[in-house]
Image: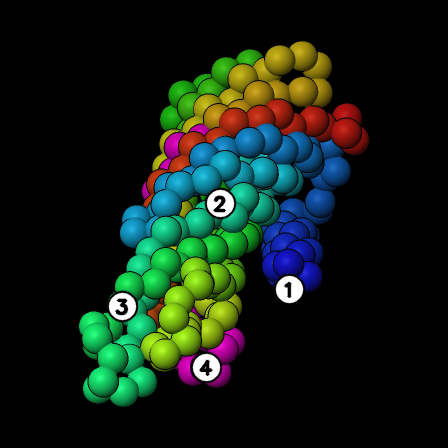
Amino acid sequence: MKKVIKISILAVLGLFSFNNSYAQFDKEKLSLGGGLGYYGYASVGSTLVVNIRGNYILDDKSSIAVSYNYHLPMTQSLSAYANSNTSLITPSQISVSRDRKVSINNICLNYHRYFVGETEESFGIYGLAGVGLTMANVSSTYGAYDTRYSLQKEADATYTGWIIDLGLGTNIQLMDKMNFFAEAKIGFAANNSYNSQSGTSGDNPIPFHYSVAAGVRYSIFQ
């Protein structure tokens, strides 16, 4: 969790640094907010998500957003197999219940381009594209089984992987300084990953996913 928060801070600082090189930073163009979402991951499951974000207007037709998404843990009910310690025991293999818990956090940097309305109008629809860094913690618990059998348990691990985001969003002004936003996105793996448990790199384990989210943001400096 601390690692993801540090990455979020660095991403925000990087965004501001980029903007300062392009034009002088205008705090009145910055809004902060959050909301709730729903993420679905292929082969893993789906869960509710808490979203916090910062949004910065670049011009009349574009803005950029940094968001942090905390996923409520997902649990998969699976089976593991234990083998008998001697050939005198039958059956030679038994099934053991296994609950696999997956906890995910990610930080995303998305560019918004409006094709209906503009950034500061009362209603707008935009396309979005960006990148994100996802961290997944995986752990397992096992049911009771006969100690005459041996079970090879999967070690807990943390996986990280870059993702690419594509989607659509809408912005609706609720009142002065406050806007409602809603987004629908798809995400897929962008590169290789790092497994903290084994200390090795490999194929990106972050599966294809989709998400919907909605919330409000407030322009605190206007």
Q: Is residue 29 left or right of residue 168?
A: right
Of pointers 2 and 1, the one earlier in the residue sequence: 1
Mark before the other along the chain sequence, 1 or 4: 1
- Vertical side of 154 occupied by 51: above or below: above
On the image, numbered disc 4 is attached to which residue?
A: 198
Taking the spot 70% from the left edge, 14% from the top edge, the residue there is 176
* Residue at x 39% of width, y 67% of height: 145
Q: Disc 3 versus disc 2: distance between alpha carbons? A: 48 Å
Single out the mark in the foreground, 2 or 4: 4
Q: Nearer the viewer, mark 1 or mark 3?
A: 3
Q: Which residue: 67% across, 12% down?
A: 175
Q: Secondary structure at mark 4?
A: loop
Residue interval drawn in magenta: 183-201
Q: Is residue 100 above or below residue 130?
A: below
Label 1 SS = helix
Q: Are marks 3 and 4 in contact (CB under 8 Å)?
A: no
Contact between marks 2 and 4 (CB within 8 A): the answer is: no
Query: Upstream in the sequence, badge 3 or badge 2?
Result: 3
Residue type at tag 1:
Lys
On the image, the x and y values in percent for residue 81 come to 29, 69
In three-dimensional space, the C-alpha distance between marks 1 and 3, rounded to whole angstroms, equals 40 Å
Determine which residue is flagged by label 3: 94
Kindly identify which residue carries mark 1. Answer: 3
- Residue type marked 4: Ser
Q: CA distance from mark 1 to mark 4?
A: 18 Å
Relative side of 146 to 28, left or right: left
Return the mark for residue 110: 2
